[in-house]
Amino acid sequence: MRGKPSRYPRNRSERPQRAQERKIEEQKDAVESPENMSERGFVMPGDLIGTSEEFTPAEGTYEEGGEIFASATGRVSVNLNSRAISITSRTKTPPRLSLGDVVIGRVSDVKSSMVLVEMAHIKGKGEREFVSPGDAVIHVSNIKDSYVKDILTEFQPFDIVKAKVIDVRNTRLSTLGEEFGVMKAFCTKCRGVLRKTENSSLKCSNCDRVETRKISSDYGTGII
């Protein structure tokens, strides 16, 4: 006579393994639960969002000197369980670049006759970081109305810039006009944030070094 099938695995060692797997899944669900997430303000690349003593850097962030900065445009999210801090977006559909768009990006390199910009945000098309076709270019002739003798006096790597799209196919940008230019800059000596002075030069908040840039009229305001 056959007995009733056992409710338990024939191999008893499987039971604690399954229990452990179930525990891991429960922990994962708890970590990813919306109740365990805290959302903060909107930030741009280069904005300070915390320290390594407080948080663990995650998606859309990078750590430098014990401080955590945003590497993308979006909203700051903190996992209350793991203390992981990340940048998240709002929209599901990535925006597309169009002629005349105003974009926010970070200077990735400065050449003798052009500036390379890693674009991160299109003004008026949601807060999501879009899929960039590659570095955009600001040619020396499109930096400002007056003659540019040395591009390094107008832009430096890691500067956050606001620019206008003048060529979609070749991804060319312009900073002609008062609205466009550098919105946030960092000291080339100590990496401190540069503050705008009364004579429109920039002064380091840490070492007092004075530098110049082709600044936007919205420099330091966070207005995009």
Image: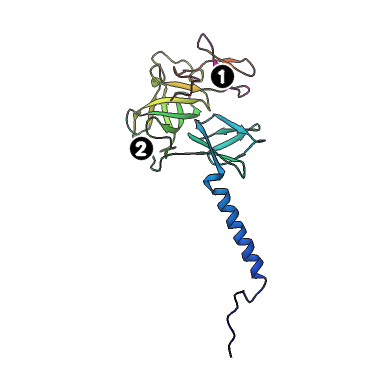
How far from the left and from the top, in percent, is residue 61? 55, 37
Quadrant where the image shows the N terminus: bottom right
Q: Identify the main secondary structure in magenta.
A: loop
Quadrant where the image shows the C terminus: top left
Magenta residues, as a range? 186-200
Mark 1 or mark 2: whose residue is earlier in sequence: 2
- Horizontal side, residue 1 vs residue 101: left or right: right
Q: Which residue is mark 1?
A: 194
**Does 89 appear above or below 117?**
below
Q: Nearer the viewer, residue 106 or 111?
A: 106
Residue type, mark 1 in image:
Leu
- Horizontal side, residue 73 vs residue 164: left or right: right
**Does 101 appear above or below 209?**
below
- The answer to which image quadrant residue 65 occupies is top right
Picture residue at 40% right of the left edge, 19% below the top: 179
Picture residue at 54% right of the left edge, 48% below the top: 33
> Disc 1 and disc 2: Cα gap in Å?
32 Å
Picture residue at 64% right of the left edge, 65% below the top: 17
| SS label for mark 1 | strand
Image coloring type: rainbow
How far from the left and from the top, in percent, is residue 22? 60, 61
Q: Residues within 10 Å of mark 2 (few under 14, many from 20)?
A: few
Residue type, mark 2 in image:
Arg
Residue 193 forms part of the magenta stretch: yes
How far from the left and from the top, in percent, is residue 210? 58, 14
- Horizontal side, residue 210 vs residue 99: left or right: right
Q: Nearer the viewer, residue 23 or 117?
A: 23
Q: Nearer the viewer, residue 124 or 208?
A: 124
- The answer to which image quadrant residue 172 occupies is top left
Q: Residue furthest top?
A: 199
| SS label for mark 2 | loop
Residue 18 forms part of the magenta stretch: no
